[in-house]
Image (cartoon, rainbow, N blue to C red):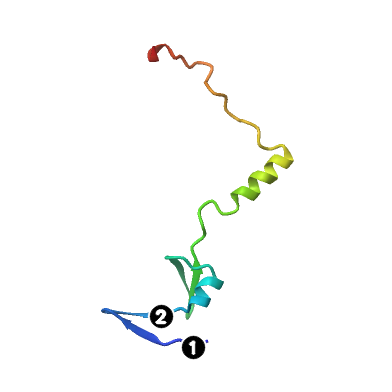
Amino acid sequence: MRAKIIQIGNSKGLRLSKTMLKKYDFGEEVNLRLEESCIIIEPVPKARKGWEESFIQMRKNGDDEILLGDIFPDESFEEWT
């Protein structure tokens, strides 16, 4: 696919179509990677992507046990009273 480099203020840039933005799930930011003579444009991964599926799988595997109790054995609440 060919694209024209356009003037954007004092800079230059590429215009990406709405279809392309949607297809590749580009948000407001992208990651740019330089490889040899290429510029790779990638979507920024969404924070916590896939966590829900991982938690469901952990529950099925019995790996979702609490590792720390509510209080530590040497903890005292006297200073709070």
Residue lying at 49% horizontally and 78% vertically, measured from the top left: 36
Residue 12: x and y in percent read 33, 81
| Residue 66 in which image quadrant | top right
Report the residue at 39% width, 11% height from top.
81
Rendered image quadrant of residue 61: top right
Element on which disc 2 rests: strand
| Amino acid on which the number 1 mark rests in the picture | Arg
Question: Disc 2 marks which residue?
Answer: 14
Q: Residue at x 72, y 37 (%)?
A: 62
Q: Position of residue 78 (x, y in %)?
A: 42, 11
Mark 2 → mark 1, Cα distance in angstroms:
10 Å
Q: Name the residue at the right extreme.
A: 61
| 38 in relation to 72, above or below | below
Looking at this rendering, what residue extends furthest in the left direction?
10
User: Is residue 49 toward the left or the right of residue 4 in the image?
Assistant: right
> In the image, which disc is placed on residue 2?
1
